[in-house]
Image (cartoon, grey):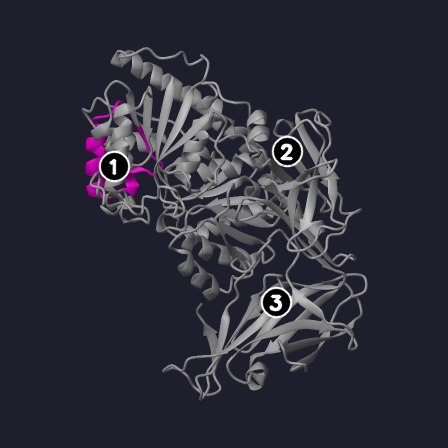
Amino acid sequence: MKITFLLHNAYTVGGTARATNNLAAALATRHEVEIVSYYRTADRAPLATADGVRTRTLVDLRPHARRTAFESADQRSPGTVCPHDPVHAGWTPPSRLGETRLAAHLRSTDADVVIATRPYLVCFLAQHGRTDYLRVGREHAGRDAHGAALLSDLDAAIARLDAYVTLSQGDERAHRAALRGARTRVTGIPVCCPAPDVEPSTGDSRIVLAGGRLTPVKRHDRLVDAFAEVAAVHPDWSLRIYGRGRERLRLRRRIEELGLHNNVLLMGARTPMEPEWAKGALAVVSSSGEPSGMSVVEAMSCGLPVVSTDCDHAPREIITHGEDGLLVPDHGPVEHALADALCRLIENEAERGRMAAAARRNTERFRPEHIAAQYEALFADLGRRAGIRRPWKSAAGPRRRTLPRSLGMVRLGRPVTVSCRVLPGGSLAFETPADQLAPRGRKLILKPRNETDAGTPRLLLEQPGTAGDDRVRAILDKRHWELAEGDWDVYLGRTGGGSSRPVRAGLVETARLLDPAALRPAHAGGRTWIPYSTEEGGLAVRSWLRPAHAEVSSVEVDDKAIRLTGALHGSTARAHHYRFMARIQGNGGHLVDAPCPVDQYGGFHVTLPVDVVAELHSGGEALWDLGLSAYGGPEIRLAMVTGDLVDRRDVCVFPAVRCAGPDGGLTLRPQLTRDHDLVLRTADAVRGPDAHGGRCGLSSS
């Protein structure tokens, strides 16, 4: 059987693309599967496509593409189908060119089943699809997410299809009620979620995780308010919110209003999410509507109990209250209910562990083989009822022959995919499938970026079978290697010498960097290795090497002072009498010099009065270096280099304080550099109607 999925853009990381990729991979084990992407907007899809799944693009929007669509008048002309779908107002709206090509594809395809994945495509399939293949609608959003005009278009289209698949039983009932009398088969089949390849969460961190686009329906605003109550009782716990969207700025402002910038982090989008779920102790969903529950299933699969609002429809169909998570009412004081449920699991480690184990067990029903079987049964039944117009290949029959991965990778010289996992103690384990490598011996090479490769680590890849599987491994042992501070790129080379080439990043697991032992002050100073995927998809390691290091754990800002709390790392940094130094970059003399006691555990507290900085500010804009010094010795920069974040600049954002004055005043804001050093930025503020001499206050970002 040949199955075709219609996607608006397969080169994004949205929930629809993830759900489609998962289902396509599940069906590709027994069928010929193709993903037709209306648009292509990137050179490489951020989501890996499974072997046997072919991806085809109708309109290539990459500016450097050989036959770019930007020059076409038909691409500049808007599409006409399903005009109420919000995709028409997005950054890649349907076009006359795209509609012409999609209609031609639907007329000529040899597929047995065509599955459309959003309202616009469902309507297009109903209008242009042939009747000699099965036409199936399936979308990631729920019925309640659509306006009346869009629902009118969608209902009319669904009534002309063979089947429409919802992702929850509740949404199935809602569509059935609206489509009474229609002959279309409406059925609910949940999302497909493969077993994670990452190590599951140990539950030892003090991190709560939330994932999803930053849109109003996700109600991250009430999650932030709820976590203000949690942080008041458990200040050592933090909340990480993953995703991007139009609510980001509003959430950032609310975080600053509540003084939660040390506890609540907006992480941006991450792909894949499994390595991030593995870092948490809990997951939380605050949505007012959750049609698919994909993030719920992913989090539970990685060993996290989930606290969720009991919203329509998926959470109540996935979570068993009190067994693998907690459901709270989606009405009334939701913030208080979420805070109470989170505190319950934070304070009860045994219950949290029991729920985590149950969560992993209970998500087995979402595995690919179970979900694919439900779709196969649906297709078979629809085919029998419709009276097949042409013979189908057996579901268990052979798939289209494809080149073995090893032959394709070696013959075409494509990058080899290498995964990296942080081990207890901070060493790095690299791993790649043996069939991606040529028969001759191979080694991994770590080269410092923009420097010569003399003396760089060269790691021989172990032979396959050493761990009972077909993967080869190499270990960068922290006890035997020392990496200079900076970025190191990972290359693959031959053991006999010769040229080397960059590798492609596979799974990168850094959860061990959040182990309690890894975050405590260390005699080795600041010595951190963080593997990461580069923007181009390569694999790299960011290294910090500081024999004496002052790690900042919290930054507090008010209209009186900037207060810094942290601990000294390094055996040579344990004198008890330190001084805090703040000086403008490029200025030879220290401008702020104040005592800074350090306790027996290396802990320190710094208070930098705002009025002192204001008096020393000479106008314009300046960056101030911040550090500690013992008895006039070398300065130890204040920084934030422990943990798992390779670039904190957009994640750890601190409030600004404004001092008003006769010339418009002064704005001060702590911030981090690319090297994670903490600096203070001062700049003349624009005079406003509320500027008063000698008065200071927090300003919004």
Question: In this view of the protein, which residue sits in the foreground, 381 or 205?
Answer: 381
Pointer 2 residue: 432
Residue stretch in magenta: 137-163
Pointer 1 residue: 99
Reading the chain from its start, which is encountered first: label 3 or label 1?
1
- Measure the C-alpha gap from mark 3 to mark 2: 37 Å
Question: In this view of the protein, which residue sits in the foreground, 28 or 323?
Answer: 28
Q: Which amino acid does label 1 sit on?
A: Glu
Q: Which of marks 3 and 2 is in front?
A: 2
- Mark seen at residue 451: none
Check if mark 3's residue and mark 1's residue have beta carbons within 8 Å: no
Q: Where is residue 335 in the image (x, y as percent from the top left)?
A: 43, 53
| In the image, residue 271 above or below residue 176 | below
Q: Position of residue 216 (x, y in %)?
A: 36, 51
Pointer 3 residue: 678
Q: Position of residue 506 (x, y in %)?
A: 58, 38
Q: Which amino acid does label 3 sit on?
A: Leu
What secondary structure is found at the residue carrying circle 3?
A: strand
Residue at screen point 68% across, 49% down: 447
Residue at screen point 76% across, 44% down: 477
> Would residue 169 appear left or right of 182 to someone viewing this image?
right
Quadrant position of the C terminus in the picture: bottom left
What secondary structure is found at the residue carrying circle 2?
A: strand
What secondary structure is found at the residue carrying circle 1?
A: helix
Question: In this view of the protein, which residue sits in the foreground, 475 or 461?
Answer: 461
| In the image, residue 216 above or below residue 412 | below
